Image (tube, rainbow, N blue to C red):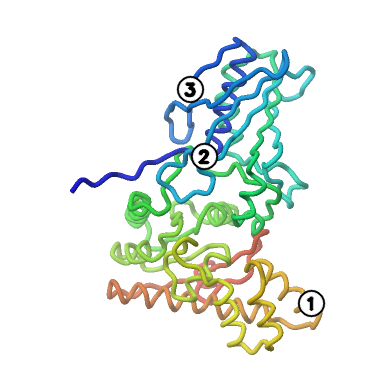
Amino acid sequence: MTVTSPRSGYTLPVFACAAAVAALGWLREKSSPLTVTIDLVKPARQVEIAIAQLAGLQQNMALAITYSDPGDNLDLTRNTPIWAVVEWQENSQQQINIVGGEGVGRILSSDGKAAIYTYAQELFQVNLSRLLKPTENIKVTIILPEGRALAERTSNTAFGVVEGLSLLGTTGISQPLSAPGQLEACLEQVRIKAKTSDRLVFCIGENGLDLAQQLGINPQHIVKTANWIGPVLVEAASQEVKEILLFGYHGKLIKLAGGIFHTHHHLADGRLEILTAYAAQIGLPTPVLQTILASSTTESALKYLQALDTETNSNWVQQLYSAIANTIDKRAQEYIFSLSDRHIRVGSILFDRDRAIITQSQTANTFLC
């Protein structure tokens, strides 16, 4: 039997950048290439990206279109069109001005700034600046025609991004979330980090990784786990790690309190059901439980409970999330022991969409002392 390796594609910023490069090429040379070469920067690799359509709109403006290809990945942006409109600008203070158009999300915590994050900005600067003379300035408008509709199927709003998708990521390579290749990459990171430390911090996704670094946690201790939490915990045990700190968004980590150790929503959910069960356990009244269960997201349920605390001068949120965090610790420790026969101390920290810490378990408190 032939085993086919999972095919890695590229992240959304790469296709947006490719469209911008093609549009700039049309402005300069009136050329219509079938592909353009993009320097991914991270990793240091050049790749060819197909250009679907390219046209001049005005003498000083061009439009190019690419289509997203994330590889063998459960990614809802597959085949979504990415448009880049590039135009010459005079008297601009920026040589390359990147603007988010229709379908690119806005960050509420940054006064509606376009959700075009650091890696995407760097990618544009590196690939476009080499095509410009020092005196030339351009404006690049990225448009995602399907972005607004697709965003409704993501957790973007949980992180304060509205009206579209984010150009997010720390690398140009799109890792298949459901493929063994990504799991092996996570396990290898555990093996490498465990050689220099017996205490590791598992960050669930980009937001956990970013916040952990902002809080000053040593990057040498950090492992980004994505959704493969269970196998990564067991690997840490096999590498004789003694302490693990779980660091993640409450809408993701809460699954561990329900015994779910692969957290991708394609495989398992139950977040609101778990939240409601723990709310019942600490004694919240039935009407409140009904509201929690009927909430659209765990974030909206949290906001409802925070408002209830303010209104009634109570502390239900702290009681509820403390119970959840301590159960996450307990269940994670039991999961590790059941599959490895090893005891490891596990602590957990949960944060909200504003990246504000909601609670940290009793064990996590000892880690951070």
Question: Mark 3, mark 2: which one is toward the viewer?
Answer: 2
Query: Given the image, on which type of amino acid does mark 3 rest?
Result: Thr
**Which numbered dot is residue 310?**
1
Query: How would you rate the neighbour count of disc 2 (Cα within 10 Å): few for under 14, some for 14-19, many for 20 or more?
Result: few
Instruction: Count every numbered label the image shows and give the total.
Output: 3
Q: Nearer the viewer, residue 242 or 15?
A: 15
**Which numbered dot is residue 28?**
none
Q: Nearer the viewer, residue 193 or 270?
A: 270
- Between marks 3 and 2, how big is the CA–CA gap? 16 Å
Q: Nearer the viewer, residue 151 or 218?
A: 151
Pointer 3: what residue?
35
Q: Nearer the viewer, residue 231 or 366?
A: 231
Query: Given the image, on which type of amino acid does mark 1 rest?
Result: Thr
Q: Give coordinates of residue 255: x percent, y percent.
A: 50, 70
Mark 1 vs 2, N-terminal side = 2
Q: Give coordinates of residue 44: x percent, y percent.
A: 43, 31
Question: Is 198 rendered above or below residue 24?
Answer: below
Pointer 2: what residue?
79
> Quick one: SS at disc 1?
helix
Instruction: Name the quarter where the C terminus is drawn.
Output: bottom right
- Between marks 3 and 1, how big is the CA–CA gap? 56 Å
Horizontal side, residue 327 vs residue 182: left or right: right
> Quick one: SS at disc 3?
strand
Query: How would you rate the neighbour count of disc 3 (Cα within 10 Å): few for under 14, some for 14-19, many for 20 or more?
Result: some
- Between marks 1 and 2, how big is the CA–CA gap? 45 Å
Q: Residue at x 45, y 59 (%)?
A: 227
Horizontal side, residue 136 vs residue 207: left or right: right
Mark 3 vs 2, N-terminal side = 3
Mark 3 vs 1, N-terminal side = 3
Query: How would you rate the neighbour count of disc 1 (Cα within 10 Å): few for under 14, some for 14-19, many for 20 or more?
Result: few
